[in-house]
Image (cartoon, helix red, strand yellow):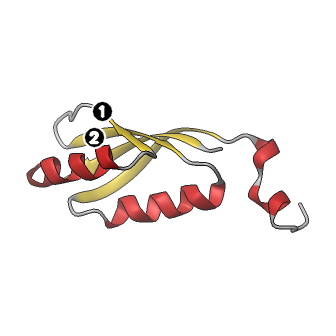
Amino acid sequence: MPVSGLLLTIDPSHEPALRSALAADLRTTPGELIGTRLPVALDTPSRQADEAAWAWLRALPGVQWIDLVWISIDPSEDDRRHHGAQV
């Protein structure tokens, strides 16, 4: 299960709608806006779900850039193991 600490660079004029979208999604926990930077915790059940969540975040109006600050991935929950691929 990937758990990530992200720092989104956003257009502040989109903050209310962006914050609403993030709050409505159980995978994300937004922090307090600092200038144009919005910290977000992202918790997904798999690497594949994590990649989908990143794509969703990049597509949100107002998101200009995403920095990965920290990530933890449990190697025992590697998606490849569940899909029958060789490691």
> Disc 2 on helix, strand or loop?
strand
Q: Is residue 46 above or below residue 23?
A: below
The quadrant of the image that shows the C terminus is: bottom right
Q: Can residue 11 be seen in this view?
A: no
- Which residue is found at the position 37% from the left and 58% from the top? 57
Q: In which quarter of the image is residue 3?
A: top right
Query: Would you identify the image quadrant in which residue 41 lies?
Result: top left
For the residues labelled 2 and 1, the Cα–Cα distance comes to 6 Å
Q: Tag 1 or tag 2, which sits nearer the N-term?
A: 1
Camera sees residue 30: yes
| Residue type of the residue flagged with mark 1 | Gly
Q: What's the residue at 31%, 48% (across, down)?
A: 24
Q: Give percent across and percent down for residue 63.
A: 27, 57
Residue 66 spot, x, y in % from top left: 38, 52
Image coords of residue 18 (percent x, y):
22, 52
Label 1: element kind: loop
Q: Name the residue under label 2.
A: 38
Which part of the image, by quadrant, shows the N terminus? Answer: top right
Q: How far from the left and from the top, in percent, is residue 64?
A: 27, 59
Q: Is label 2 or label 1 in front?
A: 1
Vertical relation: 69 (above or below) 56: above
Picture disc at residue 31: 1
Residue at x 63%, y 61% (from the top left corner): 48
Q: Which mark is residue 47?
A: none
- Direction from residue 16 to residue 7 in the image, left or right: right
Looking at the rendered structure, the number of numbered marks drawn on it comes to 2
Give amino acid for label 2. Answer: Leu
Q: Is residue 38 left or right of residue 74?
A: left
Q: Assess whether mark 1 and mark 2 are in contact (beta carbons under 8 angstroms).
A: yes
Residue sitting farthest toward the left: 13
